[in-house]
Amino acid sequence: MTDDHARNTILALQKAHGGETGEYAGDPRLVLPAAEILNAAAALRNEHGFEYLSGLTAVDYWPSQDPRFHLIYIFSSFRHNSRIEIRVPITEDETPPSITSEYWSANWQERELYDLFGVRFEGHPDLRRILMPHDWEGHPLRKDYPLGYEEVQFSFNKEEIASRKPRPSD
Amino acid sequence: MSSLQEVTVDEIRHLVSQRAMDGETVLLNMGPQHPSTHGVLRLLLELDGEQIVNCIPDIGFLHTGIEKNMEAKTYVKAAVMTDRLDYLNTMGNNFVYCLAIEKLVGLDVPPRAQAIRVIMVELQRIASHLVWLGTHALDLAAMSVFLYCFREREIILDMIEMVSGSRMMATYFRPGGLWREVPPEWEDHVRHFLKIFPARVEQYENLLTNNPLFKDRTIGIGVIGEADAFRWGLTGPTLRGSGPALDLRKSRPYSGYEQYDFDVPTHTDGDVYARYLVRMREFHESMKIIRQALDGLPSGPVQSDNRKFVPPPRSELGVSMEALIHHFKLWTEGFPAPKESVYMPVESPRGELGVFLEGDGGPKPYRCYWRTPSFVNLECLEFLSKGHMVADLVAIIGSIDIVLGDTDR
């Protein structure tokens, strides 16, 4: 199916907020600067009929690209049966504006991005960790965060490995 | 790792009212080990007597880092992890993941595989709704429904075992089609199920739909309007209970859903009872789809013959050098996907289940994000439960139909 409403919306957004358009596998997308995302979200909800935020995620391009993160917003419209993707490149220190005021469901999704990628959203009402324990160090979905593994204990090195394992008393 | 720290009241001060700080209201933990939270969900409740002033969900107890782990596996190997997300909709998770890969690399699926996928996913939807119905009724003290629901669910699990060898963690769908052809006796089992199941649904309805106790516990509880439901990002039956007939099987058909004639049940009340009625009608719609798909089941292969993505059958390996090379390449290295990204959503039993998949030109996903309906739908619990009794909270959690594996990933 062709999604004309999405294409027209992207062109309108580009006119108002700048950015570059693209398309893959029939899904149109727009790359926007971080400062524009809140205004663009407001326009999408109020003018273009995108009622809900489907997805909000990020991709880490460290170390090959700078800025290292792309935030990916996927907005959907029930009325127009339409869906668009907006990409927002940000650096590690940048704080993009939170869109929680427009799309309430962005609250947890932005918390998730803070938790797993370390992206700090400006103006978020409750920016705490959500999936990882609250005292966790590091942001696991970053590409410079190692996957980690559990050493396998055999009878000959059982004690040695056990001595290296963290224990609650430490 | 640093040693364990305790959460201080300061960290949640902005989430509770001033009355909690003055000691006028009580802060109470519900869960993480609580039978009615359907898994390891912890709710921090601020209570005024028995009334909920604030409800602060705390999730992540079942976080297993599946998205991170998938980045270290080839596309096919990572499919095994998708079962573990939403353990009541395992085939549906395989389904959306395979569809995302197929969209990313541009792979076609033969019509027979598409139809069998639809049948299995709809059976899984029925099984998932049965667990929802059983546990929801159990939470509201109707124990017998639970036993009946699990009796029927067992028949579906048997059918999943029949095709895949595993009752729950099936990984039956593979990029490009299915793992293998369904066994010959499978069709009779599905037809038998279609024959007996309508009467069983009637049985559940007789127990609940007009039951005054059930209605007392559900009507007017957890009401959400259409506009609010959209802003909270609700999808699936939880949204359809508030009015909008949003169903991705209808609005953006995939895997041949456009061939089937079915309705999208909706209700306008937006309360727990409305969501119950919507899901009960979905049993019938799923059966309609299965019946049509089974009657028009095309013959032919169940796997794409594109050897760059789908391994050749065993019989070809001994006679074709090329087949042997493909087999070797696919199982040692995997297939590469372009440096592009796709977002593929499907209608899972709980709502919009989407996969955002990005390739980097290599055989492993560079990023695989799961837009899970439980995670987004659970967020509005705070909104739904405000002002209700603790006992109603149990009904509301049941009506959103969350699976914590899906929430925490």
Image (cartoon, helix red, strand yellow):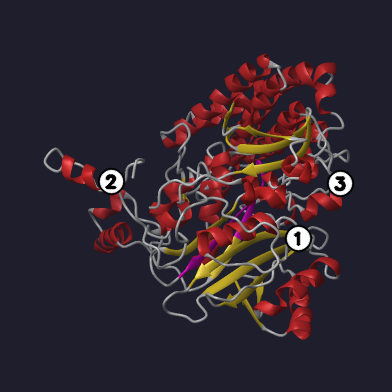
Q: To which residue does mark 1 refer?
A: A103
Q: Are marks 1 and 2 on the same chain?
A: yes
Q: What range is drawn magenta here?
A: B344-359
Q: Quadrant of residue B36?
A: top right
B357 falls in the magenta region: yes
Q: Residue at x 81, y 31 (%)?
A: B273
Q: Residue at x 33, y 45 (%)?
A: A170
1 or 2: mark nearer the eye: 2
How would you classify the magenta stretch by its main secondary structure? strand
Q: Residue B225 — which label?
A: 3
Q: Is B203 situated left or right of B340 in this image?
A: right
Q: Are marks 3 and 1 on the same chain?
A: no
Q: To which residue does mark 2 refer?
A: A165
In the rendered image, the residue lying farthest to the top is B144
How much space separates mark 3 and mark 2, taking CA atoms? Answer: 51 Å
Residue A118 placement (x, y as % from top left): 53, 65
Q: Type of residue at label 3?
A: Gly
For marks 1 and 2, the one nearer the N-term is 1
Is any atom of residue A4 visible in this view? yes
Residue B56 placement (x, y as % from top left): 68, 43
Classify mark 3: helix, strand or loop: loop
Q: Residues within 10 Å of mark 3 (few under 14, many from 20)?
A: some
**Contact, CB < 8 Å: mark 3 with mark 2?**
no
Classify mark 1: helix, strand or loop: loop
